[in-house]
Image (cartoon, rainbow, N blue to C red):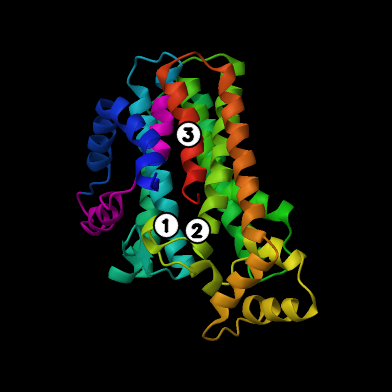
């Protein structure tokens, strides 16, 4: 079977089950990204929000709330909050990384400028806090505010660890937990809290989101070396060109001989990259089975996510979330 026939089904089923909720979330997003006095804000935001992203993070919030029996309306605001936080981080990331493509389209900073991307990202962060306050739950505010701080911390840690071959797997996981998994776990945890779930169920939702987010980021890092532009929504090889020390690189460097290490020092630490270096990096990863080892780690995190679901109510959404964990890793099957 092709990837389209298998791994996309869980996400599609989840989207179909939550279609009414997601329609409400999308309406709220469009309403709240408007600005009476600064038309540049909806222009920049719409470019990214309307670019066809999967809306995975807000769907996790909706699914967690519905799975735990919620029948109110605050999960809509929380899902929009999560999407605004995510969109704000993307706008900032593209400036930091000097990226030119996002979700298969030119980045906002390329179409407008860095100043617009940074300031509109700030606006979306502010909007997200307005939305989360409207739920009236101090615990939800605590979860999402902490996640926002953790995301920023993870991005700064990645900035300081970039181009440093001393970066090990523990630091890598800390970066991933910050820049990616923090919002996944906040999305699922907040959904459970707003639904009044038990402490055990909320903890399980946190574990699911955390593990799913780590698996998701490892797969993204793998796809940068072994995927296609269409699969990741940006140019393959961007991490290499930006000299990011991701898990496949860490695993290859750990097994490198003196000659191989000299190559990694030249292309990553010194930034002296030439034609054919990306292909050579891939060959070194293949020589030391770095890609396979990283994929095994992604599979292990996906399994951790699946095990966490056992503590949650028996519900069709639970099976969809279980299948989703498999879908995340199947992107590199």
Mark 1: few/some/many CA within 10 Å (<14, 14-19, 20+): some
Label 3 residue SS:
helix
- Residues marked 2 and 1 touching at CB (< 8 Å): yes
Q: Nearer the viewer, residue 61 or 319?
A: 319
- Give yes or no for residue 114 being in the magenta stretch: no
- Tell me residue 145's x, y (percent): 52, 38
- Give yes or no for residue 52 being in the magenta stretch: yes
In the depicted structure, whether residue 258 falls above or below residue 121: below
Tag nearer the camera, 3 or 2: 2
Q: Earlier in the sequence, mark 1 or mark 3?
A: 3
- Tell me residue 94's x, y (percent): 43, 63
Q: Residue at x 52, y 34 (%)?
A: 186
Q: Is residue 64 in view from this perspective? A: no
Mark 2: few/some/many CA within 10 Å (<14, 14-19, 20+): some
In the depicted structure, whether residue 325 falls above or below residue 252: above
Residue assigned mark 1: 232
In the depicted structure, whether residue 311 falls above or below residue 305: above
Find the distance from the CA under tag 3 to the CA under tag 2.
24 Å
Q: Earlier in the sequence, mark 3 or mark 2?
A: 3
Q: Which residues are magenta?
A: 36-64
Tell me the quarter of the image containing the N terminus.
top left
Q: Nearer the viewer, residue 68 or 36?
A: 68
Q: Main secondary structure of the magenta part?
A: helix
Q: Earlier in the sequence, mark 2 or mark 1?
A: 2
Residue assigned mark 3: 187
**171 horizontally vs 18: left or right:** right
Residue assigned mark 2: 223
Tag nearer the camera, 1 or 3: 1
Find the distance from the CA under tag 2 to the CA under tag 1.
7 Å
Find the distance from the CA under tag 1 to the CA under tag 3.
22 Å
């Amino acid at each position: 079977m092709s990837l389209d026939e298998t791994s996309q089904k869980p996400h599609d089923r989840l989207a179909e089950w939550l279609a009414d909720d997601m329609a409400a979330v999308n309406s709220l997003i469009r309403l709240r990204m408007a600005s009476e006095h600064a038309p540049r804000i909806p222009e920049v935001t719409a470019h990214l929000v309307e670019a066809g992203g999967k809306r995975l993070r807000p769907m996790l919030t909706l699914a967690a709330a519905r799975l735990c029996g919620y029948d109110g309306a605050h999960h809509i605001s929380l899902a929009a909050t999560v999407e605004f936080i995510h969109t704000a981080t993307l706008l900032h990331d593209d400036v930091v990384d000097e990226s030119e493509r996002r979700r298969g389209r030119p980045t906002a900073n390329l179409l407008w400028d860095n100043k617009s991307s940074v300031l509109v990202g700030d606006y979306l962060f502010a909007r997200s806090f307005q939305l989360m306050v409207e739920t009236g739950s101090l615990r939800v505010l605590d979860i999402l505010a902490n996640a926002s701080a953790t995301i920023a911390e993870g991005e700064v840690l990645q900035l300081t660890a970039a181009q440093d071959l001393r970066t090990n797997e523990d630091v890598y996981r800390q970066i991933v937990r910050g820049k990616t998994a923090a919002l996944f776990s906040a999305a699922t945890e907040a959904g459970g809290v707003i639904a009044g779930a038990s402490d055990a169920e909320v903890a399980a939702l946190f574990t699911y989101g955390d593990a799913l987010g780590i698996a998701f980021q490892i797969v993204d890092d793998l796809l940068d070396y072994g995927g296609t532009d269409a699969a990741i929504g940006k140019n393959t090889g961007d991490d290499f060109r930006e000299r990011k020390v991701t898990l496949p690189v860490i695993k290859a460097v750990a097994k490198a001989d003196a000659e191989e290490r000299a190559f990694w020092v030249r292309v990553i630490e010194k930034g002296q990259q030439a034609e054919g270096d990306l292909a050579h990096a891939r060959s070194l990863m293949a020589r030391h089975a770095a890609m396979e080892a990283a994929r095994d780690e992604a599979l292990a995190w996906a399994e951790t996510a699946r095990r966490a679901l056992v503590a949650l109510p028996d519900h069709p959404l639970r099976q969809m979330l279980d299948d989703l964990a498999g879908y995340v890793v199947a992107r590199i099957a």
